[in-house]
Image (cartoon, rainbow, N blue to C red):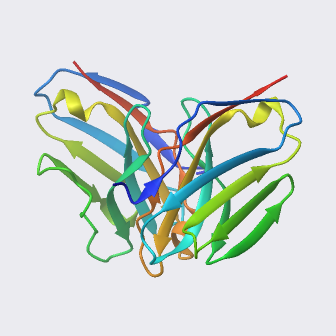
């Protein structure tokens, strides 16, 4: 597609429920990143996928968070048993083999846990 | 202490002014330095990136990196109301993939 697409744009969920956030990267981009942006804060790294390599999961805040990338394209970030502190904007980015210096971000999914 | 420090502002300047945005960092391994612009309810958009020390200019924007002081700057000349946004600095070491971001500075250019 023309850019990185994320869905849904907004999600309101009840505490304790599971949520899935989707990212469609730019076609042909091998690298995919998930970041989290809390109100008034910078972006916090969550996870990074590159081709068929094992993902870098070092930024995932707890075992309630997981992500997968199917067929080297679409990625899903899953948050289980959501908590109020999970409320944030979840941003996905993709880049070509040239790497992070030219990463393109999606518009984000605004998650609100009530 | 955060690895990257950035004054969150808000910063408000009149149209046409020169704007200076800055970040300091503590990790001497950082080699790639970037500036992103983020409009309200949008994803960050890459403005400029610089490798190691030095200056880089692109139109009205100039990025400077001073590795000896662990200090980076973004200058905006002839600022326009359309420049009103949050500006985020980001950086990463050589060979690493995850970007470390500053908190972002909220900038408003008044007509």
Is residue A105 rendered to the left or right of residue A79? right
Tell me if residue B97 comes above or below residue B90 in the rendering.
below
* B75 lies left or right of A27: right
Which quadrant of the figure has residue A101?
bottom right
Q: What residue is rendered at 57% in x and 46% in y?
A: B44
Q: Residue at x 62, y 62 (%)?
A: B72
Viewer-proximal residue among A60 and A97: A60
The residue at the point 27 percent across, 58 percent down is A59
- The image shows a total of numbered marks equal to 0
In the picture, residue A88 is in which quadrant? top left
- Residue plotted at (52% across, 48% down): B6
Residue lying furthest bottom? B95
Counting from the top left corner in percent of width and height, residue A22 is at: 36, 44
On the image, the x and y values in percent for residue B20 come to 72, 48
Residue B17 visible in the snapshot: yes
Q: Position of residue A92 (x, y in %)?
A: 43, 50
Q: Image quadrant for the C terminus of chain A?
A: top left
**Is B60 left or right of A44, judged from the image as shown?**
right
């Amino acid at each position: 597609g023309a850019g990185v697409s994320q869905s849904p744009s907004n999600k309101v969920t009840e505490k304790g429920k599971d949520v899935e956030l989707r990212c469609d990267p730019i076609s042909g981009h091998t690298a995919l990143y998930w970041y989290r942006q809390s109100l008034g804060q910078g972006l916090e790294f969550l996870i990074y996928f590159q081709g068929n390599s094992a993902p870098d999961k070092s930024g995932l805040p707890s075992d309630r968070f997981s992500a997968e990338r199917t067929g080297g394209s679409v990625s899903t970030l899953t948050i289980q048993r959501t908590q109020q502190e999970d409320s944030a904007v979840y941003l996905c980015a993709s880049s070509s083999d040239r790497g992070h210096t030219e990463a393109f971000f999606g518009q984000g999914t605004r998650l609100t846990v009530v | 202490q955060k690895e990257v420090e950035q004054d969150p502002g808000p910063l408000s300047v009149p149209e046409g002014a020169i704007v200076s945005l800055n970040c300091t960092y503590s990790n001497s391994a950082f080699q790639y330095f970037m500036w992103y612009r983020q409009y309200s309810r949008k994803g960050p958009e890459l403005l400029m990136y610089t490798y190691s020390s030095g200056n880089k200019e692109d139109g009205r924007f100039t990025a400077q990196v001073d590795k000896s002081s662990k200090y980076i700057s973004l200058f905006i000349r002839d600022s326009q109301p359309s420049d009103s946004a949050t500006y985020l600095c980001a950086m990463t070491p050589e060979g690493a993939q995850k970007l470390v971001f500053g908190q972002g500075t909220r900038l408003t250019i008044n007509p």
